[in-house]
Image (tube, coloured by chain):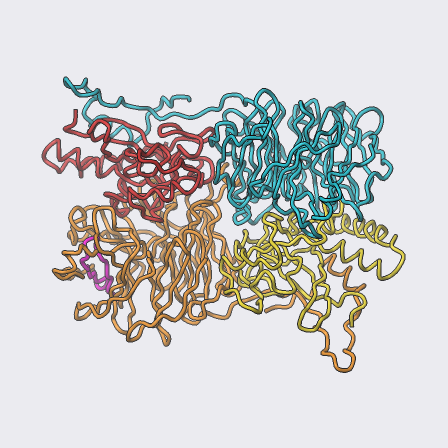
Chain colours: A yellow, B orange, C red, D cyan
C-alpha cells in the first residue's frame, strides 16, 4: 500500500534522527517525545490536567476525589487530546461499537500513582464515525509543531484510515518507561 | 470486546524499545500488563436500551442516534444519522433503521435519499437501500418510519411537500413502491398484514392495503373521527394490542382499532376534570405520550396555563391514566420533558427527556414512580426516544 | 417540473378545503392559518414570544426595551421558527450571501405595534448552506401536525430546493391581514 | 442586495388574497409596503473584514468560516468549509480558498479532497479543484494553505502522516504537482517568484523553487537556524516585506529573510527580561503573534507561569514590541485569547479571539490600545483569523 510505503520511509528517517542521541536512555526519551503526539486532538481548549471541566461537563462521571476513567485528570490521560472513548461507548482500551482503531497512533508517558511507575501509553484514535462530542480532554505536554510530526497534535490521527473521521481516543498501556521496573 | 490482533504502525515502535514488563521486585506489586486495543460490541438489548434520536439543530448535517443503557444510565454508542433523518429500531433490537439524505459534497451536489440498516449489536452498517429523494426531512416521530408488523416492509414518510409513503422491501433490500397519500400524514401500521393507515387533514383515516409485492392494492377512507380545526390530534400513536391511542391538543384521548376489515373508532374521553380545565392543563411536547402495556397505563406530558401555541411546551408534570377505567392514577413531577417513553418487561421504567439539557430521568413504573437515575448530556437537540 | 406539478395538486386541494368557509373573512382567516407554518423550524425549544433567550444568547443584539430585528420578540417574528437571518449575514427580508431562498414558504399574521395593524408575513427559509446556528427563535402559534402540512413546522421548508440544507429564515411583509387598512 | 424577481409558490397564494396595500385613511400612517425577498452581497473588503475559521470540534464535519465586519462588530455570513479544512483568503479578498475533505456519505465511502474557491462578495462557490487525498486534516494556520505571491499557485500542506506539498494552478484550476517535504512542516511563501520554504525537524529550512509549470526544479537545505529540542518555534509567520518573524516556545524571536538566492537568518532576540523570566512569561495560543506593518509592531499572546505543555494556553496579556528596536512598547490586557490578528491600512485594529466564547475583542492600534468593540458567539471552536 502506498500509504505503508510512505510510512516506512518516514519511520526510517525518524529513527535515524532519534538515533543521534548517544545513550539508550536518551534514545528512548527521544522516542517517547516523538510519539507523545496528538491523538487527534485539536488543541482547542488547553486544559490543565487538574481541570476536568470539559470532561466533567458533558456526560462524564461526577467529580470525585479519585478520578475515574471518564475524568480528564485520570492518570493515563496525561497526554490525551480529544474525546475520551470511555464516555462514548468504549473504554480506556476499546473503541465504541462500529468505530475503527486508527492506523497510526502516538505514545505518551504517564505516571501511575497506584504503583509509582511511569508507563508508555499509546493513544489510538477511533475512526469512521463523526465526532463523539463527549468528554473532551486536552493537554499539550511535549507537543511540538508539525516539523516534529510524531509529537504534533493539531492534526487528525485518523488521517490514514479509510474513513478519516475522528470519533474518540483510547489510552493503552504498552509498556513501562525505560528505567522502570 | 473483540481484540484487534493486527499491530498498528507507530505503536510497534515504542513497544520494541520499551523495557519488557518484567516481574516485580520483592515487596512491589507487579507492573500493569501490556494491553491490546479492542472494539466494543453490545449485548442483545435487555428491554431498557434507549435509542435517542438527536437532530443536532445547530449542525443538522451531523445528526445521530445515541444508544444508552437506560437502567444503568450508561452511554453505549452512537449511530451517525446524517441530515434530517427518520429513525426506528426493529422490535427485536437487531436492526436500527435510518432514512436519511446525503449530498456528495456535504451540502451540495445531487441529493441521495437512502434507508440504512445498522446492526444493533455492532453498530456497523449492514446495508443501504436507495429510495426516492422525497423522504420527509422532519423531526423523527414514532409514525414517520415504520416497519410492517412482520418486518418484511419498511414504510417511509415522504414530503415534497406533497405527501406519499415509500415502501421498502427489507428482505430484498430494495425500494418497491411509492404510495400517494395526499393531505394525510403519519404511518400507523396494522398489527396484521401489510396495511397502514394515515391521518388526513379532514379528520379521516386513509387505509392502504399492500399486495405481496408491496404495491397498493386497495385504499379506503374512513368516516371523520376527529375535528382537526377544533381538536387536532398528535400523530404519535400508543399501541395496545391492535388499539391505537392518540391524544389531542385539548387533552382528549382517541382510541382507534386497527383490526378486522376497517378501522373502528371509540368515543373520545377527556384527560381533564373541571379543575384541570380551569388551570388550562394540556398535553405538550414532541413524544407527548407513552404507554405501559402490562398495566394499561398511559402517561401524558402535561403543562398548565396552556394556550394556542403551547402544544409543544415541555411538561410540568407527567400524568398517568388507567386506559380501561379512563381515570387518572398519578401525577408525577417532570424534568421539563418534551418526550416520554416507557419500557415494558420485567423492569419497566418511565423515561422522560429534557431537550435543553439532553437529560433523561428514569423512574420505576411502580407505586410512587421512584426515580432510578438521571443521565445528562445525551445529545444537543434530542427529540425522540425508543426503547428495546 | 415534477415538483411543481405535485404542488399544483396540493394547492388545489388546499384551496378547496379552505373555500368551505363561507365568508371572505373566514376564507382568509383559514388561509392565513394554513400558511402560518414552520419556516423550517424544528420546534425544539418552544420559547415564549417574550423570551428572547435563544436569540439573545448567541450573537444577537443586547436585550433592550425595544426589540430589534435580532431579537426573537421583534413583532414580525411572531411565528418564526428557526435561525433569524438577521443574525446570519442577511436581514429580515434578505438571505445571507451565498444562500438561496426556499421554493416553498408559509405565512403568519403578526401585529405591528408601531401602526396597530396586522400584517401577513411570509417566512421563507434560506437554503444551500448548513445551519447558521445563530439566533434560534421558535413559536408554535397555530402550528398543526403534518396532516395540515401548510401549518406544520416539524419539517424542513428547504425540502423543495436543489440543496435542501436549511440555513436561516427571513420574515417578509406580503400584505395586510383582511379587514385592516 | 439583489431582488429575487421570481415569485415563489405558496407566497403567491396569500398575496392575491390579502387586502391590497391601500393608501392610509386620514390621520393614520400609511401601512408598510409590500416587500420582496432579497439576497445579500458583500461590498469589497475594507481592510477590517475578518474571516474566522471554525473547526466545530463537536461536529467537525460541519466546519465553517465566519465572515465578520470587525470594525462594526457585525456578522456578515458563512462559508461552509467541511471536515478539517485548511482555509485562506486571497490578498485582495476576492477569493476565499478552502482545502477540504468530502465523503459521498458524510463519513463513509471514497475520500475526496478538493480545493474550493468561494467568491469573497457573493460567498458562492466559484470553482472546485480535485487534489490528492492527502491534505492535512489539521487546525488551519496561516502557513497551511498559501497562495504564491503572484496568486498563480496555491500550496496545500499534506500529511499522511508523511509530509508533502500539493501545488494547485489557480489559473488553470488544476492540480499540478506534489512535492515531498519529508520531516518538514508549514509553507513559507517567498515574496518573489514561485518559491516556498518549509521548517524542518532538524532546525533547518528546506526551500523549493518551482518552474513555470509548478514542478519542483530545485530544493535547497539551509543551515540549522534554531534548535527544535531546546527552543522550538511556532510555524505561524509574521511578514514584514521579505522578512518573516517566528517566535519560539521560550519567547525568542527568529527573523528569517526570504529574498535573494537563499534564506538569511538574523540572531534571535528575546521577548523577556529577567523579571519576565522569573514569572515564566511565555508565548501561548494558536495564532500566537500578529504584526502591524506600518508601525513595525509585533504583538505576542503571553501568559505567566508557563511550563511544559502551556504553549497553547490562552493569553493573560498581549505584549507589543517594536521590531526594529526589539523593545517592548506595551502590555495590553487580553480576553483569554488564543489567536491574534492585526489589520493594516487607515483603521488598523488589533483583534484577539477567545475560543471558548467565540469572542473577538477589537482594539485600536493607537496609544493605549482602546477597546473598540466586542463580538461574541463567533463560532464554537474558532481558531484562526484572517483580515482583508
The image quarter containing residue A49 is: bottom right
Quadrant location of the N terminus of chain B? bottom right
Outermost residue toward the right? A22
Residue C37 horizontal side relative to residue B118, left or right: left
**Whether residue A146 is visible:** no
Between residues B37 and D336, which one lies in front from this camera angle?
D336
Residue at image coords 20%, 27%: D18
**Image-based side of B68 in relation to D166, left or right:** left
Q: Nearer the viewer, residue D250 or B211?
A: D250
Q: B209 left or right of D180? A: left
Q: Position of residue D176 (x, y in %)?
A: 71, 31
Q: Position of residue A37 (x, y in %)?
A: 70, 53
- Tally the numbered discs: 0
User: Quick one: which residue is furthest to the left in this view?
Assistant: C22
Q: Is residue C134 visible?
A: yes
Q: Is residue C122 above or below residue D85?
A: above
Residue at the extreme front: D275
| Point 58% across, 69% down: residue | A66
Q: Is residue D240 above or below residue C6?
A: above
Q: Quadrant of residue A112?
A: bottom right
In this rendering, is residue B338 above or below D92?
A: below
Q: Nearer the viewer, residue D322 or D255?
A: D322
Where is residue D188 shown, x and y percent of the image? 73, 33
Q: Which residues are magenta?
A: B242-261
Q: Is residue D154 magenta?
A: no
Q: Residue at 64% of width from left, 43% of height from top?
A: D285
Amino acid at each position: 500500500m502506498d500509504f505503508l510505503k510512505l510510512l516506512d520511509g518516514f519511520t526510517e528517517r525518524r529513527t535515524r534522527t532519534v538515533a543521534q542521541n548517544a545513550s539508550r536512555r536518551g534514545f528512548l526519551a527521544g522516542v517517547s517525545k516523538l510519539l507523545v503526539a496528538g491523538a487527534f486532538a485539536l488543541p482547542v481548549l488547553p486544559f490543565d490536567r487538574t481541570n476536568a471541566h470539559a470532561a466533567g461537563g458533558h456526560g462524564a462521571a461526577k467529580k470525585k476525589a479519585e478520578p475515574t476513567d471518564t475524568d480528564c485528570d485520570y492518570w493515563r490521560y496525561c497526554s490525551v487530546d480529544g474525546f475520551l472513548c470511555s464516555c462514548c461507548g468504549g473504554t480506556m482500551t476499546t473503541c465504541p461499537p462500529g468505530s475503527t482503531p486508527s492506523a497510526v497512533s502516538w505514545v505518551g508517558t504517564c505516571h501511575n500513582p497506584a504503583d509509582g511507575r511511569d508507563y508508555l501509553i499509546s493513544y489510538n484514535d477511533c475512526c469512521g464515525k463523526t465526532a463523539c462530542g463527549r468528554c473532551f480532554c486536552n493537554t499539550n505536554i511535549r507537543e511540538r509543531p508539525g516539523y516534529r510530526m510524531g509529537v504534533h497534535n493539531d492534526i487528525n490521527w485518523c488521517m490514514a484510515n479509510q474513513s478519516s473521521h475522528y470519533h474518540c481516543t483510547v489510552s493503552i498501556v504498552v509498556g513501562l518507561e525505560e528505567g522502570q521496573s | 470486546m473483540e481484540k484487534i490482533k493486527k499491530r498498528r504502525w507507530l505503536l510497534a515502535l515504542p513497544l520494541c524499545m520499551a523495557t519488557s514488563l518484567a516481574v516485580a521486585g520483592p515487596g512491589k506489586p507487579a507492573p500493569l500488563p501490556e494491553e491490546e486495543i479492542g472494539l466494543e460490541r453490545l449485548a442483545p438489548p435487555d428491554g431498557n436500551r434507549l435509542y435517542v434520536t438527536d437532530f443536532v439543530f445547530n449542525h443538522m448535517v451531523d445528526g445521530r442516534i445515541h444508544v444508552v443503557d437506560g437502567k444503568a444510565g450508561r452511554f453505549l454508542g452512537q449511530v451517525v444519522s446524517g441530515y434530517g433523518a427518520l429513525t426506528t429500531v426493529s422490535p427485536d433490537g437487531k436492526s436500527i433503521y435510518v432514512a436519511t439524505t446525503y449530498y456528495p459534497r456535504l451540502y451540495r451536489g445531487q441529493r441521495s435519499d437512502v434507508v440504512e440498516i445498522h446492526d444493533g449489536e455492532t453498530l456497523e452498517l449492514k446495508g443501504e437501500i436507495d429510495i426516492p429523494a422525497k423522504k420527509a426531512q422532519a423531526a423523527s416521530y414514532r409514525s414517520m418510519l415504520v416497519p410492517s408488523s412482520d418486518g418484511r416492509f419498511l414504510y417511509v414518510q415522504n414530503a415534497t411537500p406533497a405527501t406519499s409513503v415509500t415502501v421498502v422491501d427489507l428482505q430484498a433490500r430494495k425500494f418497491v413502491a411509492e404510495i400517494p397519500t395526499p393531505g394525510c400524514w403519519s404511518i400507523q401500521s396494522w398489527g396484521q398484514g401489510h396495511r397502514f393507515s394515515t391521518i388526513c387533514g379532514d379528520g379521516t383515516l386513509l387505509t392502504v392495503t399492500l399486495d405481496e409485492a408491496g404495491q397498493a392494492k386497495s385504499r379506503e377512507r374512513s368516516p371523520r373521527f376527529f375535528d382537526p380545526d377544533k381538536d387536532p390530534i398528535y400523530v404519535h400513536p400508543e399501541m395496545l394490542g391492535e388499539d391505537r391511542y392518540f391524544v389531542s391538543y385539548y387533552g382528549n384521548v382517541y382510541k382507534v382499532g386497527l383490526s378486522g376489515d376497517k378501522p373502528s373508532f371509540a368515543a373520545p374521553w377527556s384527560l381533564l376534570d373541571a379543575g384541570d380545565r380551569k388551570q388550562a392543563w394540556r398535553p405538550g411536547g414532541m413524544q407527548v405520550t407513552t404507554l405501559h402495556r402490562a398495566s394499561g397505563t398511559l402517561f401524558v406530558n402535561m403543562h398548565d396555563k396552556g394556550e394556542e401555541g403551547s402544544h409543544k411546551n415541555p411538561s410540568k408534570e407527567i400524568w398517568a391514566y388507567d386506559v380501561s377505567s379512563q381515570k387518572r392514577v398519578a401525577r408525577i413531577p417532570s424534568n421539563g420533558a418534551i418526550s416520554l417513553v416507557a419500557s415494558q418487561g420485567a423492569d419497566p421504567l418511565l423515561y422522560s427527556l429534557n431537550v435543553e439539557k439532553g437529560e433523561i430521568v428514569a423512574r420505576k413504573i411502580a407505586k410512587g414512580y421512584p426515580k432510578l437515575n438521571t443521565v445528562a448530556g445525551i445529545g444537543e437537540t434530542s427529540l425522540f426516544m425508543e426503547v428495546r
